[in-house]
Image: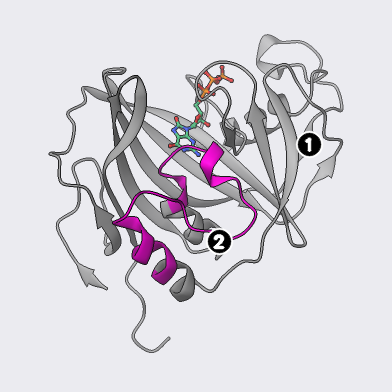
Amino acid sequence: MSSTILPPGLQGDLQEVISGGSTDWLDYQFVKFYTNAYIFQDDKLLLGYKKRGFGVGKYNGFGGKVDPGETPDQAAVRELKASVSNRYINKRLKRTQEEAGIDAPLQHCGTFLFVMKPGPEWAFQIELYRADTYSGTLEETDEMRPQWFSVSPPSLDSAVAEVASKAEELSEAPALSSIPFASMWEGDYLWFPFLLSNQHFTGRVDFEEVDGVPRLARWWFGVPPRNPTD
Ligand SMILES: Nc1nc2c([nH]c(=O)n2[C@H]2C[C@H](O)[C@@H](COP(=O)(O)OP(=O)(O)OP(=O)(O)O)O2)c(=O)[nH]1
């Protein structure tokens, strides 16, 4: 791994792990914050099939916009509950919160900027969370259908090597597991190895629409420098 110039919008002491694409980084006017949470249990990962709205028809983690006055951590907890229970009543609406949805000890595990053209004038800054356990009852909602997928978490090095070898081809997402990459956001397979191996990461993905379909145009992912004594 070598250090490099970071893409616009990224900050920190980061070492590049993977990058690609040849277009200029896309412009954006401002940043909006979003969350995306992943629940693991034993050798399974919970994803939701998005039934409506942005990303309809794709499998994804559970999340949405960070509301004004909320921290991303708070939004991640709220969105996780709301995504998997019709009976969840939002505290912010000053109504009683029912015991519904799921709770999980979410840990922040990564950040990426997502820019799309044509699209909104903002960059999506997506704060990623994961947990290895949860409590509560999963329910299908009008927004998401939860579904478990089997995973075998790779070591970071083997996962990165596999992704790097495929990334230039961009024809097919790697078969890391039974995770349905073909039905997910096209850039997800680039950073899933970090999520699966629990390695904190930062990155950026730019999408450009071709014939109405968003296509990966440029990407960069990095991790904090490793301690040489590790
Ligand atoms: N896995 C993945 N998720 C993405 C990508 N781009 C992207 O916006 N997302 C996520 C971030 C958010 O969790 C979600 C977008 O939020 P949303 O559009 O569903 O939010 P929403 O308005 O429904 O939220 P809300 O009504 O519940 O507040 O999609 C991507 O490339 N990969």
On whether residue 190 falls in the magenta region, the answer is: no
Residue 29 coordinates in the image, percent (x, y)? 21, 22
Corner quadrant of residue 83: top right
Distance of label 2 from label 1 (alpha carbons): 27 Å
Nearest the viewer among 70 and 148 is 148
Residue 130 coordinates in the image, percent (x, y)? 61, 50
Residue 205 coordinates in the image, percent (x, y)? 32, 41
Q: Which mark is residue 102?
A: 1
The boundaries of the magenta stretch are: 161-189
Label 1 near ligand 1 (CB < 8 Å): no
Foreground label between 2 and 1: 2
Nearer-N-terminus badge (2/1): 1
| Horizontal side of residue 117 vs 94, given as left or right | left
Corner quadrant of residue 135: top right
Which residue occupies 71% across, 17% down?
90
Which residue occupies 84% across, 27% down?
100
Amino acid tagged 2: Leu
Question: Which part of the image, by quadrant, shows the N terminus?
Answer: bottom left
Q: Residues within 10 Å of mark 1 (few under 14, many from 20)?
A: many
The image shows residue 169, relative to residue 88, as above or below, that is below
Secondary element under disc 2, as helix, strand or loop, is: loop
Amino acid tagged 1: Ile
| Horizontal side of residue 118 vs 64, given as left or right | left
The residue at which mark 2 appears reads as: 176
Q: Residues within 10 Å of mark 2 (few under 14, many from 20)?
A: some
